[in-house]
């Protein structure tokens, strides 16, 4: 398991005044660094803000954006919002699954490079179908462009 | 760092300075930096334009704060122009030219020809049916719109409070701080007839009145920027393109209702909106437009931003306040209502982004002006995200009461690829579909409710003849199943059952009795769910059942999907159009296609895995699905 930098967690907690009502923002900051929420970090945070671990777990698992599992280096968010759906985003998703060796049940590839996530709308519907890799939006995707993108990222990795 | 303003006179002086600097920019280049055009590489173009200007030794500025005093050219990053389909976009003022599909390489030509030479570059202009449209306002997509909320989107630097001030920004707030009483503000909003743009259409003035009536010292203003409806992005463009307008509306609400704290809840998927809002808030704080004792008026207001974490249900009022408090975002039973006991159990005025963005103009120009467009019961305009199988996708704003035909054909330019119109899905997972027969219906809050749809937040997805309505219905039901918070049984279990039935129908295992089952389950969920999510969840299914029952029946009885969307029911056939080019056979991953050169090929349906590669690759469109 990854080593957690408690100093970093402390700085996040401090930034949010150790305030229990800021727990979502705290977890967002932690996830931004580690790309997921390490268990040790959660235990530590719960203690520091005075919240039971189960309650914190409840919040963390309620929201779709939080992940308790490690993520690949490239998190590919495939939009399955309405606009993307009617422009056949499912074919793009399929191509990404095949190209990265992932599936509906297995979100992260064995080489730890790719995680495929399905999101419901990235708000870039005018450019549908859309795939967002880390924070970059890729517009008007096709299965071919999806395969190319994976190949490019793999090369650059 | 900006100098803090202490009173109205200082505000006026700053404003005069901003106007002066604004007018000194005899040319402006507005590079669209909305999410769409940024994805298209417009940030690089923005930088390249500056380099080119420098290379030509021409004076330019990127911000009014570094105004050179004399005449010069402004190169600005604007918010979304709405015409994302044609992006990346660049607008040149004062001519009002719009350049479409711009690339970094075009920077040199834009600078040399258009900025320094005053010449239009035809290559970058917008062409439609062989005609060239130079001015943005003449393009049919824009000409037929009435832009009020989105008036500034794409026309000003979205990261500059000085620019917002130069075009009359925060004037309305000054009026509220120094001229009007709280009751007068609320009366103006009530008289305008402004109804909430977040879906339900509740009169904004009445909500404000209810919050103002509470004598508690602590009350809250919450701005709903969750925009969970998949296929909608109006609020995003508003927050990205004109963030100060949203803030101004919220501060006015605070002054009117006597609250001093505001929260904006933005979806996590909107990082750019968050950053633009943060910049705007910081600028306001520097100038003292946010903070304690705003411009010496004795009124205070503080603004906070919360980022959502990917739960659709958080768009619901009580779930949103729970989420801001750091809890699971689950709705609760009402009453007590949010206006009485909302955020931190205090009276809370919760409105949608677009609702707040309408407020400054109502105060500045008056209720009568606001009512000059729209319908009697739904005055004003509405922004829609026009997407799907339509030629011009993008962000539009039209008067309430505009017909669907005007939107889809007049502004949207009709259906993509010459296909036939089938339906429009409006209101997302809570909405329904409108068909051919509704094309001439004036759309407002009330008229749509009568035909089983809703304006909702304004997502408008055009569906062509190739889209299967059963699949659409299942798509939304699947979404609801994933997003149901699980608190109440009708929504949690009921939608799961409906989803199972729909999935069986699309798999070819449906029964005729399923249709009645869907209807009765749907009605039950509508009446017995806890919150709006469940209450409206069956709408897409019931609405497609009403309008497209024959498609359901085909799936069940004939095991056929006429659009070839439901893979389990479709098979691929090669028609007589085949020219025997062998391309399909070569591309088939499972070697299911046989045939000889220049002769018609055949697909072995027992081997075929229905991947669609052959159809996608056929040069003469000879492969049919269905
Ligand atoms: C499941 C669900 C999701 C909602 N999502 C949103 C949303 O994304 N944005 C929004 O403004 N309102 C949303 N609403 C409506 C809000 O509950 C609320 O009515 C609205 O924000 C009030 O603002 P308004 O009166 O200005 O429209 C949602 C409601 C429900 C039940
Ligand atoms: S539906 Fe995909 S970006 Fe909106």
Image (cartoon, grey):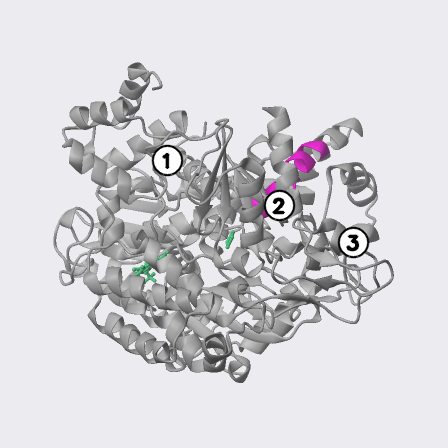
Crowd band around label 1 with a 10 angstrom C-alpha radius: few (<14), some (14–19), many (20+)? some
Report the magenta residues as a range.
Answer: B30-48
Above or below B455: residue B250: above
Q: Nearer the viewer, mark 2 or mark 1?
A: 2
Look at mark 3 in the image and give the residue it sits on.
B583
Distance Cα–Cα, label 2 vs label 3:
36 Å
Residue closest to the eye, B402 or B594: B594
**Which subunit holds the residue at mark 3?**
B
Q: Which mark is residue B37?
A: 2
**Which subunit holds the residue at mark 2?**
B
Look at mark 1 in the image and give the residue it sits on.
B285
- Going by the image, does B28 lie left or right of A96? right
Q: Secondary structure at mark 1?
A: helix
Q: Quadrant of residue A149?
A: top right
In the rendered structure, are the residues bearing label 2 and label 3 in contact, judged by CB atoms less than 8 Å apart?
no
Residue B203 placed where, x, y %? 31, 69
Residue B526 placed where, x, y %? 26, 72
């Amino acid at each position: 398991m990854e080593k957690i930098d408690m100093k970093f967690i402390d700085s996040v907690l401090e930034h949010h005044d150790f305030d229990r009502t800021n727990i979502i923002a705290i977890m967002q900051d932690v996830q931004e660094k580690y790309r997921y929420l390490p268990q040790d970090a959660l235990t530590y945070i719960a203690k520091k803000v005075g919240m039971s671990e189960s309650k914190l777990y409840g919040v963390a698992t309620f929201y779709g954006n939080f992940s308790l599992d490690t993520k690949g280096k490239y998190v590919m968010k495939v939009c399955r919002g309405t606009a993307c759906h009617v422009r056949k985003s499912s074919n793009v998703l399929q191509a990404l699954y095949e190209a990265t060796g992932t599936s509906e049940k297995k979100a992260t590839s064995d080489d730890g490079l790719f995680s495929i996530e399905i999101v419901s709308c990235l708000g870039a519907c005018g450019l549908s179908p859309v795939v967002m890799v880390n924070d970059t939006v890729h517009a008007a995707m096709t299965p071919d462009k999806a395969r190319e993108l994976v190949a490019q990222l793999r090369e650059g990795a | 760092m900006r100098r803090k303003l202490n009173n109205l006179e200082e505000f006026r002086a700053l404003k005069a300075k901003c106007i002066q600097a604004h007018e000194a920019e005899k040319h402006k280049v507005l590079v669209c930096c909305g999410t769409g055009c940024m994805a298209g590489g417009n940030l690089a173009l923005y930088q390249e334009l500056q380099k080119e200007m420098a290379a030509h030794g021409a004076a330019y500025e990127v911000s009014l704060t570094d105004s050179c005093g004399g005449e010069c050219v402004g190169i600005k990053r604007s918010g979304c122009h709405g015409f994302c389909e044609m992006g990346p976009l660049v607008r040149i003022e004062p001519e009002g030219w719009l350049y479409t599909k711009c690339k970094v390489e075009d920077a040199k030509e834009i600078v040399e020809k258009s900025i320094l030479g005053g010449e239009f570059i035809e290559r970058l202009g917008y062409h439609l049916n062989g005609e060239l449209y130079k001015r943005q306002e003449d393009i049919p997509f824009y000409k037929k719109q009435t832009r009020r909320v989105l008036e500034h989107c794409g026309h000003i630097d979205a990261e500059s409070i000085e620019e917002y001030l130069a075009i009359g920004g925060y004037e309305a707030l000054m009026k509220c701080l120094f001229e009007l009483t709280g009751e007068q503000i609320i009366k103006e909003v009530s008289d305008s007839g402004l109804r909430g743009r977040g879906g339900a259409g509740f009169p904004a003035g009445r909500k404000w009145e209810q919050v103002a009536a509470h004598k508690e010292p602590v009350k809250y203003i919450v701005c709903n920027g969750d925009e969970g409806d998949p296929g909608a992005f109006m609020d995003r463009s508003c927050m990205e393109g004109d963030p100060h307008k949203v803030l101004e509306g919220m501060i006015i609400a605070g002054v009117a209702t006597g609250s001093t704290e505001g929260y904006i809840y933005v979806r996590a998927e909107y990082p750019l909106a968050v950053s633009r809002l943060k910049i705007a808030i910081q600028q306001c704080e520097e100038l003292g437009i946010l903070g304690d004792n705003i411009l010496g008026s004795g009124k205070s207001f503080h603004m906070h931003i919360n980022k959502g974490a990917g739960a659709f249900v958080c768009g619901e009022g009580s779930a949103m306040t729970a989420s801001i408090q750091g809890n699971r975002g689950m709705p609760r039973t009402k009453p007590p209502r949010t206006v009485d006991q909302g955020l931190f159990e205090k009276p809370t005025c919760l409105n949608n982004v677009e609702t707040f963005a309408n407020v400054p103009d109502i105060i500045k120009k008056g209720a009568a002006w606001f009512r000059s467009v729209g319908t009697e019961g739904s005055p004003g305009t509405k922004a829609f995200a026009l997407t799907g199988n339509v030629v011009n996708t993008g962000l539009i704003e039209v008067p309430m009461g505009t017909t669907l035909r005007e939107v889809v054909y007049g502004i949207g330019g009709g259906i993509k690829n010459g296909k036939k119109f089938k339906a429009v899905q409006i209101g997302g997972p809570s909405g329904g579909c409108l068909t051919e027969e509704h094309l001439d219906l004036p759309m407002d809050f009330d008229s749509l409710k009568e035909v089983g749809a809703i304006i909702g937040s304004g997502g408008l997805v055009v569906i062509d003849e190739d889209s299967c309505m059963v699949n659409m219905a299942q798509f939304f039901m699947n979404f609801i199943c994933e997003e149901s918070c699980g608190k109440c049984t009708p929504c949690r279990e009921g939608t799961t059952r409906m989803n199972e039935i729909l999935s069986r129908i699309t798999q070819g295992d449906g029964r005729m009795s399923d249709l009645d089952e869907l209807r009765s389950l749907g009605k039950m969920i509508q009446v017995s769910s806890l919150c709006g999510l469940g209450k409206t969840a069956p709408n897409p299914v019931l609405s497609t059942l009403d309008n497209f029952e024959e498609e359901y029946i085909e799936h069940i009885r004939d095991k056929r999907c006429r659009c070839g969307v439901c893979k389990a029911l479709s098979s691929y056939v090669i028609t007589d159009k085949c020219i025997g080019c062998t391309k399909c056979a070569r591309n088939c991953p499972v070697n299911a296609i046989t045939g000889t050169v220049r002769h018609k090929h055949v697909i072995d349906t027992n081997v075929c895995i229905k991947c669609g590669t052959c159809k996608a690759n056929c040069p003469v469109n000879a492969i049919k699905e269905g």
